[in-house]
Amino acid sequence: MSQKELGYVELEWTCPVCKTRNPGTQTTCSGCGAAQPDNVQFEAPAAAAIAEDQAKIERAKTGPDIHCGFCGARNSATAKTCRQCGADLTEGKAREAGKVVGAYAPDTGAVVRCTACGMENPATARQCVRCGAPLDKAPVAPAAAPAPAAAGGMGRGTIIFAILAVVVLLGLGWLVFAMFQTSDTVATAVDARWERSIAIMGQVPVQASAWRDEAPANAADLSCRTEVRSTSDSPQPGAREVCGTPYTLDTGTGMGKVVQDCVYEVYDDYCTYTTLQWGVVNTVVQRGDGLAAAWPGANLGAGQQLGQRSEKYVCVVTADDREYTFDLRTDAEFAQCQPGSRWRLSVNALGGVTDAEPVR
């Protein structure tokens, strides 16, 4: 991210003795004459125009001011001796610089009312033009009042909704209980069922998206739109500059440098297109009863090949005149579902088999 300089504005500082707001480049208070202490920070004014005074701008560029180590007076960065007491400034303390003092607020013609006489003054004024009293900064707009609370009490619709919610929760609770509450029984195998399938793979048209230079050579039906592909800290051919809200940095001189953080959005063509990729064009399935499971035959067309195989095995058992079914994961487990074989089952209250193992 690059930083773009927009110019300089004069900051201000508030006298700790009489609370007068003073121009940033002024080193003593307009109200009481006190010097600005080194611990009194510069502040952003309520509103300010970009400065045109070249002398102030050049001073802001020389570096932060220095407070004399003997008398505390504020001096420019280029001074060698204190302007007030003549002391060597190598023992002085440079003001801090680089701190963000706030968003840049241009002069929009706003006014601030004097609390002493009621006179309306420009937001940039520090003393009332009528009575000379110190002015506060332009007031901040009051926060919106919270919306009034709804009248108390529950409507009929709310009560019905609450009852329905309780019924649904009770039903879900019973369902969960029934699924996990199991009982054991011994059942006899009476049948075995199986299903085997094979996917047939081939080239199928699919829609895809990519940057123009990344689209495959066989792409068809190309349709492109311009989008941001990347950002850069420096200008690029065809890039668009995007900057954030201007803000002000304290230079330590009473002047603030107004800057924006900017990036450059680099655009390119992002395209949708149709291309051929391997995909499932058909699935052949064979089902049957008994333990002699077989794979289905597959007639392959030009450019086709066999894909993923899948299989499903089910054992059918009876106990107490009820029929149960459960899945078996492998050929070896399926082979144990011999007619007449005995199985120990865990059955939930819904009649579902949650676990099964052959009786040895």
Image (cartoon, rainbow, N blue to C red):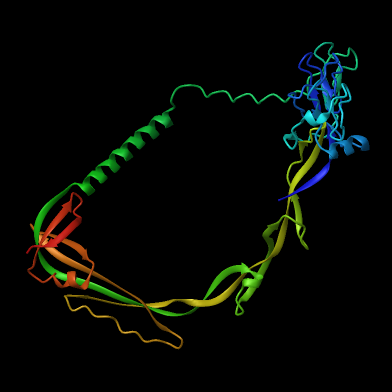
Classify residue 176 by image quadrant: top left
Is residue 14 depicted above or below 292 in this figure?
A: above
Question: On the image, which quarter does residue 293 sit in?
Answer: bottom left
Image coordinates for residue 18, horizontal then vertical, percent: 79, 13
Spot occupied by residue 267 in the image (x, y as percentages of width and height) = 71, 62
> Looking at the picture, does residue 268 appear above or below residue 279?
above
The front one of 242 and 326 is: 242
- Is residue 92 visible in the rendered image? The answer is no
The residue lying furthest to the bottom in this view is 302
Q: Answer left or right for 296 relative to 121.
A: left
Viewer-closest of 306 and 234:
234
Q: Residue at x 14, y 61 (%)?
A: 357
For the point 81% across and 45% down, which residue is it?
5
Judged left or right of residue 146, residue 22 is right
Residue 351 visible in the current orientation: yes
Give coordinates of residue 81: x percent, y percent.
87, 29
- Residue at the spot x=66%, y=25% of the render? 143
Q: Is residue 150 left or right of residue 107?
A: left
Towards the viewer: 96 or 288: 96
Quadrant, the C terminus: bottom left
Quarter assignment of residue 29: top right
Q: Position of residue 330 (x, y in %)?
A: 22, 70
